Amino acid sequence: PILDGSKLPEYSYELAKIAIRPSPWICGKEYDNTVDPLTHQKPFFIFVHVYKTAGSTLRSFFQKFAQICSKSWILVIHCTGVNLSTIQSEEGNWEKCDVKSKLESVARGRRSLSVNNSMLRERFDILGGHLRIGTADNVFRNNSSKHLASLQHYSDESAPPLRHIVFLRNPMDRYVSGILYQKFEVKKKKYSVDHVVQIIKEEVIGARKKNQYQDRILGYLLTPVQVDSLNKYLNQVNKMKSENCTIPDNNFPKNIAE
């Protein structure tokens, strides 16, 4: 993601090559020091678990992969609302973000962990959980080689060492799955199929009447920087409305609109 709100580069064949370049990871302890030849950093994978999109299956996959390949895996929760200033800090802990479980290739005891950039960089290879794309953009930023000093340009010389993995699902299937999970798993209630169908119909009809749409996926696909820009924009809009001012059409945050 673009960190300063500048315009995204044109998506080109060169960028496509970077996006699909093979990972330099090779399984086993003897390859612990493997680095990405483009970034000169160890590979770092981030699994962005969008709600109700095969998360349990993929979490299990990454944990087993870490066990077999001597990698370190950390699963976090409550991170979609992480404070922007804390993830941009080198030593500060990610506010509103907690560790749910971890598997480290090197035994470090049972002490509790706080999530921060230096800890992720030095101790883990795979980060997963309910978090936004771009949450970990600063993990390597303060420790990177000179050509990684800016993450604004995506070329062969400056590609960030982060690989995001996001699993998406048909929106209607995901919505129904979420309703079923809330009713059966969270509330532990027993409903007939007809009752669940009626609940879904009523929720959809009620939302359409209010012109409301499900936008929960934006909690994962908007970066923390974009969310910060959007919140500042909305605060400005609300202030202008309260003062009966005209809202400029061209005032929407560029790092979201583009």
Image: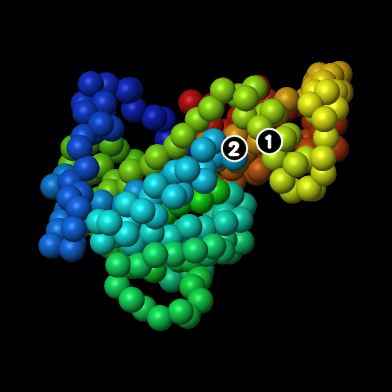
Quadrant where the N terminus is found in the figure: top left
Near mark 1 (Cα within 10 A), the count class, few <14, some 14-19 or many ≥20, is: some
Question: Dot 1: what SS?
Answer: helix
Q: Nearer the viewer, residue 205 or 120?
A: 205
Q: In this view, does 180 lie to the left or right of 220?
A: right
* Residue 52, numbered label: 2
Q: Nearer the viewer, residue 231 or 50?
A: 50
Identify which amino acid the numbered label 2 is placed on. Answer: Lys
**Residue shown at 46% from the left, 79% from the top:** 110
Q: Say which label, 1 or 2, has the lower sequence index.
A: 2
The alpha-carbon separation of the residues under discs 1 and 2 comes to 6 Å
Q: In which quarter of the image is residue 121?
A: bottom left
* Residue 207, numbered label: none
The x, y position of residue 65, in whole percent, is 32, 52
Identify which amino acid the numbered label 1 is placed on. Answer: Gly
The x, y position of residue 172, in whole percent, is 64, 22
Residue 190 vs 246, above or below: the answer is: below
Mark 1 near mark 2, Cβ–Cβ under 8 Å?
Answer: yes
The answer to whether one can see residue 22 in this image is: yes
- Structure colour scheme: rainbow
Q: Nearer the viewer, residue 163 or 240?
A: 163
Q: Which of 228 and 191 is in front in this view?
A: 191
Question: Which residue in the protein does label 1 denote?
Answer: 178
Q: Quadrant of residue 247?
A: top right
Question: Dot 2: what SS?
Answer: loop
Q: Is residue 213 left or right of residue 117?
A: right
The x, y position of residue 18, in whole percent, is 23, 33
The x, y position of residue 210, in whole percent, is 85, 23
**Residue shown at 59% from the left, 40% from the top:** 51
Residue 139 vs 130, above or below: the answer is: below
**Residue shown at 79% from the left, 26% from the top:** 193
